[in-house]
Amino acid sequence: MAGNQLGVLNALDVAKTQWYHFTAIIIAGMGFFTDAYDLFSISLITKLLGRIYYHVEGADKPGTLPPNVAAAVNGVAFCGTLAGQLFFGWLGDKLGRKRVYGLTLMLMVICSIASGLSFGDSPKGVIATLCFFRFWLGFGIGGDYPLSATIMSEYANKKTRGAFISAVFAMQGFGILAGGIVALIVSAAFDHAYKARPYSVNEDRSTVPEADYIWRIILMFGAVPALLTYYWRMKMPETARYTALIARNAKQAAADMSKVLQVELEAEEEKVEKIGVAESKSFGLFSREFARRHGLHLLGTTTTWFLLDIAYYSSNLFQKDIFSAIGWLPKPETMSATHEVYRVAKAQTLIALCGTVPGYWFTVAFIDYLGRFTIQLMGFFFMTVFMFALAIPYHHWKSHNAGFLIMYSLTFFFANFGPNATTFVVPAEIFPARLRSTCHGISAAAGKAGAIVGAFGFLYASQSTNPSDTDAGYPPGIGMKNSLIVLGAINCLGMVFTLLVPESKGKSLEELTGENEEDGDEIQQTSSVQTVPV
């Protein structure tokens, strides 16, 4: 296949791991660090928002967000993310990966700051403003998914491509961890500076006025890592695969990659032109040819990501509710507002440290040895096992918190050493260059549709079957035990749809997509490109 391939692309495929690979991982990865921080930090502050803006005088318990408000606050960013994945995924194929890359980052910076500055003279006004800015924050985050994955896949060599794309995604783990640490530091500082009392001791002093700054600081901090990487994103050259295969600018592709790889590359203008006009390379997303070649692949990447995110985001966004249900977090009325933020952040940081972060990096270490298919199938299998192990003897775990924590951490470990990473990697490898960003965006948007189902559905489903034990404003649900059983069944379904996803380990992108195939005799293997170290 290498004989049909452009020299500049072959040079990228066979290049040894170099400094520019790590630079690309850091630049793209910091975007994902910010994405995870921004998306998951909201779960650290929802209880605090309820105490501040929905407190009822004389109530036995602190205020909580009403069901519709909680659903909006938790889910609105995912709605924005879904829209951003589709829009920026399409735009990345039309205008180029680099031209769109900086725009998504600036949108994230502006909306992170604006979220913390949410204003209003009533609770409804503050929450409405917060939701508005978090929608557009999600829109920017959405663009980062297809663009970061596509850029990394098109820069990487074929031997370690899986590890490089996974490493970008693994920065999510550090983003989740950073969110917990920032919340710990901020809440501890405020708890120390303003001596708040437990709600049951002093209702009025339980939530000090200064607590309103806590959630704002936590949200605004998300702008910092994104701002730090903006300059470096703008300095990255466009990927050679976009420049050569889509823009058909052989000279620019050769010049850009000569600098990156530090070798001398010859521009193959005639070969690029033949590839561009070849009939077999011109089919569109909604064509029969695409359906024949990649229809089942797209079905596989969308369904597996959709099913994964229902389970993953249900568990991640509502850790605080799960911990409260098993008694790992004290009852809200026994804590002050600031101390409750501290306890929630501590619990989520422990989960991130024990299960989330290690799982990501196990994928980085093993994905190019075990393969994407094996890791994804294995991950779904163990997520099913541990979810059922949590659910079936659910009442047993109420008196064995340490055991529950271990099992729960293992669920996250195998989500990240499994489908949470591979569903991100595979769509960036198996679709043609001119549709790669679009198809990744569609796959990721299906995932976020699953996250929305999880964010909105789990809130209601996990409520107690006993009307007297439900949270204020919620109808009775199916209970935490049955909700966990449903999530286990969803993971099991993920194993079935994984069978539609092809293995992409060790192959060049053009081999996987068929872009190396000859169209009649148009592309001959006679032309070759010399790469000479300089």
Image: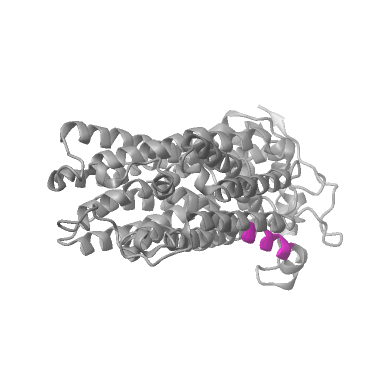
Vertical order, 102 against 457 (above or below)? above
Q: Which of 340 and 293 lies nearest the eye of the viewer?
A: 340
Dividing the picture into quadrants, the one containing residue 279 is bottom right
Magenta residues, dominant SS class: helix
The residue that appears at 35% across and 48% down in the rendered structure is 109
Which region is colored magenta?
Answer: 294-304
Coloring basis for residues: one colour
Q: Position of residue 123 (x, y in %)?
A: 20, 61
Q: Quadrant of residue 484?
A: bottom right
Q: Is residue 300 magenta?
A: yes
Decide whether residue 77 is among the magenta residues.
Answer: no
- Is residue 247 visible to us here? no
Of residue 292 and residue 244, the one placed in the foreground of this image is: 292
Looking at this view, is 508 or 260 the one in front? 508
- Closest to the observer: 499 or 280? 499
Residue that appears at 20% across and 45% down: 199
- Left or right, residue 215 beside residue 285: left
